[in-house]
Structure formats: structure tokens, C-alpha cells
């Protein structure tokens, strides 16, 4: 395969680029300090291509170069080839991917009034956060607002669970309750013990769903501000649902249907 994209081979573990990527892999908060995000795997690279831009820098392991993924190779601004042993150090996975890309951290979006929104109130599990982003994108919500105490939206675990949803959403994190005033939308909160049953409720659209901490639920302050309290019937008798599962049910329930 031939490509016009500049290709560089790096063999030193101490190379500054590889040290930067390892920091992003090992420290969940490093993306904020470094202003960059490491996307592992061709699926996330394709998500960048499809919804955002050409990946500026793609890293490929030596055994897979030249790569059969021609469309990724051609679109990249630069390609770096590294030995397989070094590529394994750039992954938090048991089975590392053979490629990844480094992008600049997208700018934080301002709160957009009137946009169908999901609010994350101290949701701490990265897998839950990523799954909720994926459901939000699937069901027509255009904005996700993460309040302080929520897992970082651009950490590796959240990115993998989101499966590319990040690049189809307006994302903002580190917000306070007061920042939600700009939404100008009815707040709909989830609860395990009070409110209307989701399958019977007349839900507004657009709206802002508030999904709370895995153990404590939605804060009392946001409960007090809510226009609607919603719970999910569980005829099997379980006490509560995982927040990501509950989110998928609720977001689907209020989304416009074709």
C-alpha cells in the first residue's frame, strides 16, 4: 500500500510522544492537563472520521503496517509506526488494539438552551457514563451535561463504552446546578421509589433527563427543581436498575418515534 501521509517510525520507549500517550492511558485526569485525548482502536478512529475530522495522528503497531485500513491511513495527517511491545504499553486493555489516534481535547460546549439534554449528576462509573452517552446519541439527545463529581467524559473507559457517541454530542463537564438555569427545559428526574411510571407518563419533548449517582440517586436539590419524577416498573421484584440500563429505558420512552 502507498500513502502520501507522512510516516515516522519510533523505537524508543522514552520518545516524548509515547510518554505523553502512556500518561493519558494511566491517568484518567491527564486529558485535562495535556489538552489531548487518546482514542484506542479503529472503531473510535472511524467515529472521528465520520463525525468530526481526519485524525491528526495515528499510531500503528509494526506487525500491522502497512495497514489494511486504507481509509484511515489516507485520512490521517501523520502516521507513527511503533514496535508491538511499545504499542502494548499504550493500552489499558488485556488485548490491545493494533492502532490508536491522538486528538486535541474538543472544546467544552456552552449550555445550549432548548436542546434535548441528559444531565449526569455525580455518575461515577466510567462504563455507565459511556453507555449513557451512547443511549443519548441513539435516541436523539444532542447535549450531555456532566455535573461536578461525574466521571471524566474523555477518559479511556468512557470513550470505549461510548463507542463513538462523543463525536455526535455537545459535551460539557464540571458544571454546577446553577449552570442548568440556562437550559430553559423541564427537568425529568429518575427515582426508584416515587413518581409516575415511565410507561404511563406523558413525557415532555424536548426535556432534560437527570440521572443520578449509582448509590445516592439524584441530589435533593435537583429533585426539588424537577418538573417530573419518573420510576420504572420492575415486576421481577428487583430494588433498582443499573443507572445506564435505566437511562436507556427512560431516554427511549420520551424520544420522538419515527
Image (tube, grey):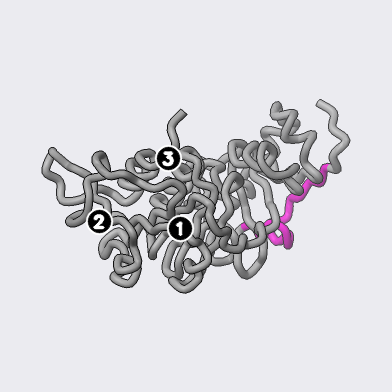
Q: Which residue is mark 2?
A: 191
How far is mark 1 from mark 2, CA to CA? 19 Å
Residue at 49% x, 61% y is: 184
How far is mark 2 from mark 3, CA to CA? 19 Å
Secondary structure, mark 2, is loop
Residue at 38% x, 58% y is: 187
Q: Which residue is mark 1?
A: 185
Secondary structure, mark 1, is loop
Region in magenta: 7-21
Residue at 32% x, 51% y is: 243
- The image quadrant where one finds the N terminus is top right
Please rate how many residues cluster around mark 1, counting C-alpha atoms within 10 Å: few if below 14, some from 14 to 19, many from 20. Answer: many
Q: Which residue is mark 3?
A: 255
Q: Position of residue 177 (x, y in %)?
A: 43, 71
Q: Is residue 245 visible?
A: no
Identify the mark nearer the N-term, 1 or 3.
Answer: 1
Identify the mark nearer the N-term, 1 or 2.
Answer: 1
How far is mark 1 from mark 3, CA to CA? 15 Å
Q: Position of residue 230 (x, y in %)?
A: 27, 51
Please rate how many residues cluster around mark 2, counting C-alpha atoms within 10 Å: few if below 14, some from 14 to 19, many from 20. Answer: many
258 above or below 56?
Answer: above
Pick the front one: 100 or 193: 193
Q: Is residue 247 visible?
A: yes
Horizontal relation, residue 107 to residue 217: left or right? right
Amino acid at each position: 500500500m502507498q500513502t502520501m501521509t507522512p510516516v515516522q517510525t519510533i523505537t524508543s520507549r522514552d520518545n516524548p510522544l509515547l510518554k505523553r500517550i502512556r500518561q493519558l492511558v494511566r491517568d484518567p485526569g491527564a486529558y485535562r492537563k495535556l489538552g489531548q485525548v487518546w482514542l484506542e482502536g479503529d472503531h473510535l478512529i472511524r467515529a472521528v472520521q465520520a463525525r468530526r475530522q481526519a485524525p491528526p495522528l495515528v499510531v500503528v503497531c509494526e506487525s500491522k503496517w502497512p495497514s489494511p485500513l486504507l481509509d484511515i491511513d489516507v485520512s490521517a495527517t501523520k502516521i507513527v509506526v511503533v514496535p508491538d511491545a511499545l504499542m502494548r504499553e499504550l493500552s489499558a486493555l488485556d488485548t490491545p488494539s493494533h492502532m490508536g489516534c491522538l486528538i486535541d481535547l474538543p472544546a467544552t460546549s456552552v449550555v445550549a438552551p432548548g436542546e434535548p439534554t441528559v444531565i449526569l449528576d455525580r455518575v461515577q462509573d466510567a462504563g455507565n457514563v459511556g453507555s449513557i452517552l451512547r443511549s443519548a446519541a441513539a435516541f436523539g439527545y444532542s447535549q450531555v451535561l456532566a455535573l461536578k463529581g461525574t466521571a471524566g467524559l474523555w477518559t479511556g473507559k468512557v470513550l470505549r463504552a461510548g463507542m463513538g457517541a462523543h463525536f455526535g454530542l455537545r459535551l460539557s463537564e464540571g458544571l454546577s446546578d446553577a449552570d442548568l438555569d440556562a437550559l430553559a427545559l423541564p427537568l425529568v428526574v429518575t427515582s426508584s421509589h416515587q413518581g409516575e411510571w415511565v410507561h404511563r407518563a406523558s413525557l415532555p419533548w424536548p426535556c432534560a433527563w437527570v440521572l443520578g449517582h449509582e448509590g445516592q440517586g439524584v441530589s435533593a436539590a435537583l429533585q426539588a427543581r424537577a418538573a417530573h419524577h419518573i420510576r420504572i416498573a420492575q415486576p421481577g421484584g428487583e430494588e433498582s436498575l443499573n443507572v445506564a440500563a435505566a437511562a436507556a429505558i427512560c431516554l427511549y420512552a420520551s424520544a420522538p418515534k419515527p
